[in-house]
Amino acid sequence: MNKIPVGILGATGMVGQRFVQLLEGHPWFEVSQVLASERSAGQPYGAACHWLLPTPMPAAAQGLPVKAISPDTAAKLDCRLLFSALPGKEARPVEENYAQAGYAVCSNASAHRMDADAPLLIPEVNAAHTRLIDVQRRGRGWPGFIVTNANCSTTALAIVLRPLQDAFGLRRLSVVTMQAISGAGYPGVASLDILGNVIPYIDGEEEKVESEPLKLLGKFDQAAIQPADFRISAQCNRVPVLNGHTECLSLEFEQPADPSTVIEALETFSAGEPVAGLPSTPARPVIVRREPDSPQPARDVETQRGMAVLVGRVRPCPLFDIKLVLLGHNTVRGAAGGAIHNAELLLAQGYLES
Ligand code: NAP
C-alpha cells in the first residue's frame, strides 16, 4: 500500500521528536510536513530542532522545511492526518482550526481530552469510543475531527485498570506517581531543581489522573460517554529519572481478588481485532514481572519498543485489597507512540478515508 503522508504540529519539541523517530520506517505512515512556532519556521528540520533522542535524527526528516502554524496553513498541507504535540494552551484553537479545515487530528495535548464529543482513546482500552467521532462531526459541522490520547501517567494506569475492572470491578484506588523529567518537555525542569531531589507537585497532573481513567473506562451509549463510577486519589511527583513513569497503586475491588487472580487477569489481557493486528500493538499490553525489585525505569522502560506496561510487586494490601507497581514509557506509550497507535486504529476502522 502507498504510505499515507502525515504532518506533525509541534515537531521540534520533546514529543514531536518522538513522532519523527517512531514514524521512521512505519509501514502505513510517512512524515511529509513538520510544523512548529515562528521561532523555528523557515529552517530545515535538522537545523531548527535540538535533537534529544539517543537514535540519530532520521535522514528523511533533516531537510524537511519547518512551517509556521498559522490559521492559513490549514488549507495548504499535502496531508490529511496530523499528529499534535503542541502545548495545551496553543493546542485548543490550532487543533480546532485544522479539524474544521478537514484534517484528522490525533492529539497528545490535554486541551480536548475531556470535551464531551472528543474520543479519549487507547486502542486496547476503549476502541469502541471512536464512534464519538460521528457525534463530534455532526455537532460541530467539521469535515475533519479531533481524537486525543490520555495524559502520560493516565495511559499506563488505564491499560492496567481495564482488565482489573473487567475481572473484579473497581471500587476505589490510590495512585502515587514518580514521573520522569522528559514528561516536562525541553528544557523542562531546571537541573538545580531536580538533581538529587523529588518535587511533590506537577501542575494539573493529579486532576488529570483522577478524571481521565473514568472517561477511558466509561461506556459509549450512542450519544456520549457515560463515565465509570469508581474513585481515584492521585499524588504526583517529579523524580530525577530520564524516561518512564512509575506508579504505586492500592486497589479496592467489588469482587474478591488475590495476587494470583490479579496476575492472571493482567497476563491474559489482550486486545481483540482489529487492535491486535495494528503495527504498534505490543504482543502483550501488560507484562507482569516476578522479581521483587521490578519494574525499574532505567532497565525496563524500552520493553516491547516502549509500548508495553510493566507490572510488579503484586501483593495484598492491608488497607485495600491489592498493591502493585507499574511502569510506562511516558513519551512513547504515553505520548507519540499512543497517538500513532490511535491513528492506526482510525485507519483500520475506516476513519481516515477521504
Ligand atoms: P515541548 O518540548 O515544549 O515542545 C512544544 C512544541 O510546540 C515545539 O515544537 C514548539 O515549537 C511548539 N510550540 C510551542 N508554542 C507554540 C506556538 N505558540 N505556536 C506554534 N508552535 C508552538 O513540549 P512536549 O513535552 O513535546 O509536549 C507537547 C505536548 O504533549 C504537550 O501538550 C504535553 O502536555 C503533551 N504530552 C507530553 C508528554 C511528555 O512525556 N513529554 C506526554 C504526554 C503528553 P518551537 O520549537 O518552534 O518552539
Image (cartoon, rainbow, N blue to C red):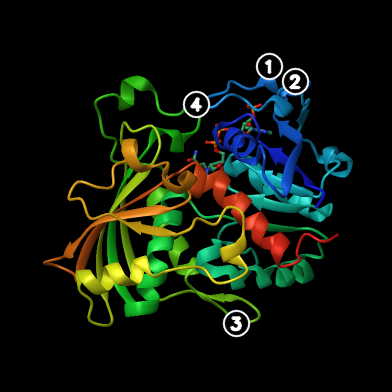
Labels 1 and 2 touching (C-beta < 8 A): yes
Contact (Cβ within 8 Å) of mark 1 with mark 3 = no
Give coordinates of residue 177: x percent, y percent. Answer: 31, 48
Q: Which mark is residue 47?
A: 1
**Within 8 Å: ligand 1 and the Cβ of disc 2?**
no
Kind of residue at disc 2: Pro
User: Could you tell me residue 114's position as x and y percent?
Assistant: 55, 61
Query: Which residue position holds label 3?
Result: 221
* Mark sitting earlier along the chain (4/3): 4
Q: Earlier in the sequence, mark 4 or mark 1?
A: 1
Q: Which residue is mark 2?
A: 44
What's the amino acid at mark 3? Asp
Of 329 and 101, nearer the camera is 329
The percent coordinates of residue 147 (x first, y second) are 65, 58
Left or right for 189, reference 74: left
Q: Earlier in the sequence, mark 2 or mark 3?
A: 2
Q: CA distance from mark 1 to mark 3?
A: 48 Å
Q: Find the distance from the CA under tag 4 to the CA under tag 3.
A: 44 Å
User: Mark 4 or mark 3, which is nearer to you?
Assistant: 4
Q: Nearer the viewer, mark 2 or mark 3?
A: 2
Beta carbon of the mark 1 residue lies under 8 A of ligand 1: no
Q: Secondary structure at mark 1?
A: helix
Q: Is mark 3 within 8 Å of ligand 1?
A: no
